[in-house]
Structures are given as C-alpha cells and as structure tokens.
Amino acid sequence: MSTTLAAQPVDARAVYQLAFRKEKDALRALAPLWQVTLGEGDACQQAQQQSLACFRNSGGLALIRQLERPVVLALHDDRDQAIYAVLGGLKDQTAILQLDGHARALPLSTLATMWRGDFITYWRTPPAFRMKILPGNTGPVVDWLALQLAKMDKAPAPSGKQVFDTNMQSRVYAFQMAQGLKPDGVVGATTFMLINRAVGVEEPRLQTGQTTARRDDVLHP
C-alpha cells in the first residue's frame, strides 16, 4: 500500500545540490513513469526501441500544462551550469520536483530564476511510427490515426487501407483548433500526444490539484 507524503518545501540551493548533472540520468529517472527501464547510453535511442519517442521543446509551463505529462526540466545552477530535474506535478504557484527520490515543492517564482523554459519528455508512439504524417501518407500510422479520430467522433471503426487525404486532414484541423494548437493539419509530436490523451492511451499524467503528493504517484504511473 502506498503512503502519502507531503511534498517538502525546497529552495534553490537544495535544487542545485540534488538535481541531476546529466540529462541521461534524469531521463532514466523519468522512464519508469512510462513503465520502461533504460540502461546506460543514449536514453532516447533506447526509448525508441520501446515504442517511446523523446520530445524536446522550449515552450515553458504553458505547453507542459497543455501536454499534461511529467517532464525533465533543463535548469541552470548559480554558476550557469546545466542541471536537470523531473517535474512530476504543478499546484497553484508550486512545482513538484522529484529530487533524490522525494517529492519537493519549489515556488514557481524560484523556478523562474533557474529555468528558461526548456524541457524534454517522452510520448508513446503509434505502431510503425517513423515521422510526422503529411498529406498523401499511408501505412500503419495513418490507419492508427483514422481509428483514433473515429473513436473521438464515436463513429464506426474505418476499414481497409487509409489515406491521409483532405477529409482526414480537415478532421485534424478541427482537433488542433479545439486543443489550442496551430491548425496546420500536420500530425506531429504535439498533436500525437494530445490525441493519445484524448483517446486514453496509457501514459502518465502530470499531478495537479493536491498540495500533497503520493510517492507512488510520482515514481509510478
């Protein structure tokens, strides 16, 4: 049975001391949330072999809230050296970081002094995923997309080979607009992540709403 632990307050100096010094170590700490274990070496390459892809962006908290998933924050210490921490939750004006295996509450005002908006996370890819979907594409990923769009519309599952044609692209436009994305009709990582969330693909969620954090909630999905 999991125990409930309050996220203990932490200051900038403690973050500097407890954060990861290497990105790959932070990514390995993040991986169990997706129910995978990564060894030494390139974390993103290993993740790809387990149907995950890395996603890097500098969109800050607005995009993290939209994607609603734990991430690795690329921080800078007081000597402007790169350090990394897993962000497991957000509550009001507080970031819940995983530091040294424990949930720590850091004010967003303090986070702003060491963070420039850069982060990296994982997302679960469709079968045979290679790259974003463009008009005219076919294959297993397009078939997967057609099925997810049908689920969202509560429509019958499509049959046969699917083509990313103007009709499917129009449906993607509508989805992107509803999600607050730029409606470009191109299915890239951000659109895939929000589709995953909309249809219930098993991925961890960012913890929100409670000032206390269960240790198991942050360390496991």
Image (tube, grey):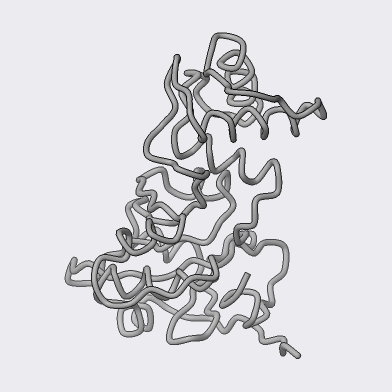
Q: How many marks?
A: 0
Q: Position of residue 33 (x, y in %)?
A: 54, 69
In front: 28, or 140? 140
Quarter assignment of residue 19: bottom left
Q: Residue at x 44, y 81 (%)?
A: 99
Quarter assignment of residue 28: bottom left
Q: Quadrant of the C terminus?
A: bottom right
In front: 26, or 125? 125
Task: Judge whether 152 appears above or below 111 on screen.
Answer: above
Q: Quadrant of the N terminus?
A: bottom right
Q: Position of residue 141 (x, y in %)?
A: 51, 34
Q: Residue at x 56, y 56 (%)?
A: 69
Task: Judge whether 167 appears above or below 101 on screen.
Answer: above
Q: Position of residue 130 (x, y in %)?
A: 37, 39
Task: Judge whether 37 appears above or below 42 on screen.
Answer: below
In front: 196, or 101? 196
Q: Residue at x 39, y 49 (%)?
A: 55
Quarter assignment of residue 156: top right
Relative placement, left or right, of 118 versus 67 is: left
Q: Residue at x 58, y 23 (%)?
A: 161
Relative placement, left or right, of 178 versus 87 is: right
Relative placement, left or right, of 190 versus 221 is: left
Q: Position of residue 108 (x, y in %)?
A: 49, 61
Instruction: Point out the residue furthest to the front here.
Output: 160
